[in-house]
Amino acid sequence: MFRPLIEMMKEVCGSYPPLSEQRHKQVSKFFSPIRVETNYLPDDSSKNKENKGTKRQVRTVILAPYGKNATNVTFSKTDANGNVTHPTVQQHFLEEHNIRLHFPRAPLANARNADDPNPIWIPAELCKILPGQLKRGLLTSDQTAKMITFAARRPHANAESITGNGLTVTMINPVVNGENTNLKEFGVKVDPRMITVPGRILMPPTVMYKGLKNRTPNNGTWNLKVSELGLSPFRVVKKLGEW
C-alpha cells in the first residue's frame, strides 16, 4: 500500500508544516532518506499524442531544511527563448504542470544529496512512500501500537498477509510458468505456497483444586471464582510434567 508522504508527516509530528524547528528535525530524521513514487511528469514516450498522460518515477529523497517550502524556495528556469526567470516551486508546478498545491507550506522533498548545488525540489504532497522499506530508529507511539496489534493477529490472518502482500513486497511474485520472474536470473526458485504439516489438537488437562473441585480449561483459560473455589483454592505447587 502506497502512503502519501504528506499524511505520514502529519502522523509523525502532528501537523504540516511542522510547528517548530524541533518538530521539523523529528520529521526529517524519520524520513530521510526514503524512497518515493512520483507521477506528475508528462510521458513523452506515449504513442497517444493528444493525451500523453504521466509517467511513474521512483526516487530517493530527503527533506529540505527547516523553513524551506514551495512558497519561498526559488530556482533558475530558462524558457525556450532563453529568458531566465526565478519562480517559486509553487509557481512552477502551477504554470508547468497545472498543479495547484494544497499544502504549499509543507517541507519540500529533495531528490538530490543535501550538498548538491542543484537540488530537485518536489512538493511532499506529490510523493507516495513505497511499501516494504526498512525503518531504522524509533517509531511513534501510535505506530508502535499498530505494529503490536498487527503482530498479535491470529495465524490465519498472518498467513493471508504472507501469501498476499508479502509475496509482492519481497518480489517473489509474480510467478510465471512456475518460476519467479524477479528471481529467475539469479537461479533462485521460491514456492509461493506455505508449507503445511500434519497436526493434532490435544485435550486440555483437568485442573483440580484443593477443595476437590475440577475445572476444564477453555482456550487455555479457566475461571477462578472465589464464590465457588474459596479464597485459597490451590493445592501444593508441583511441577507439571509431560502430558
Image (spheres, helix red, strand yellow):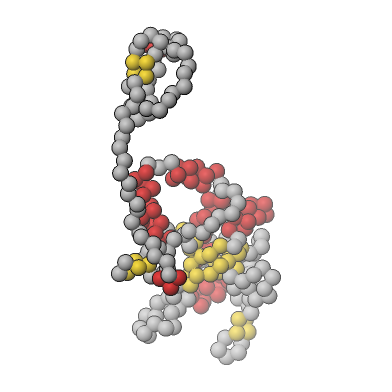
Image quadrant where residue 228 sits: top left
For the N terminus, the quadrant is: bottom left
Q: Taking 194 as reference, is 64 left or right?
A: right
State whether residue 4 appears in this view: no
Q: Taking 47 as reference, is 113 left or right?
A: right
- Residue beneath the point at 44% across and 12% down: 235
Image quadrant where residue 53 sits: bottom left
Could you say which is closer to the camera, residue 69 or residue 209?
Answer: 209
- Residue beneath the point at 33% across and 56% down: 193
- Residue beneath the point at 37% across and 27% down: 243
Q: In this rendering, is residue 8 above or below 111?
A: above
- Farthest residue to the bottom: give it: 81
Could you say which is closer to the camera, residue 190 or residue 159?
Answer: 190
Image quadrant where residue 119 sits: bottom right
Counting from the top left corner in percent of width and height, residue 191 is at 36, 60
Counting from the top left corner in percent of width and height, residue 126 is at 50, 66
Q: In this rendering, is residue 182 above or below 27?
A: below
Counting from the top left corner in percent of width and height, residue 136 is at 59, 54
Numbered disc total: 0
Counting from the top left corner in percent of width and height, residue 218 is at 33, 27
Q: Taking 80 as reference, is 53 left or right?
A: left
State whether residue 96 appears in this view: yes
- Residue beneath the point at 59% across and 62% down: 33
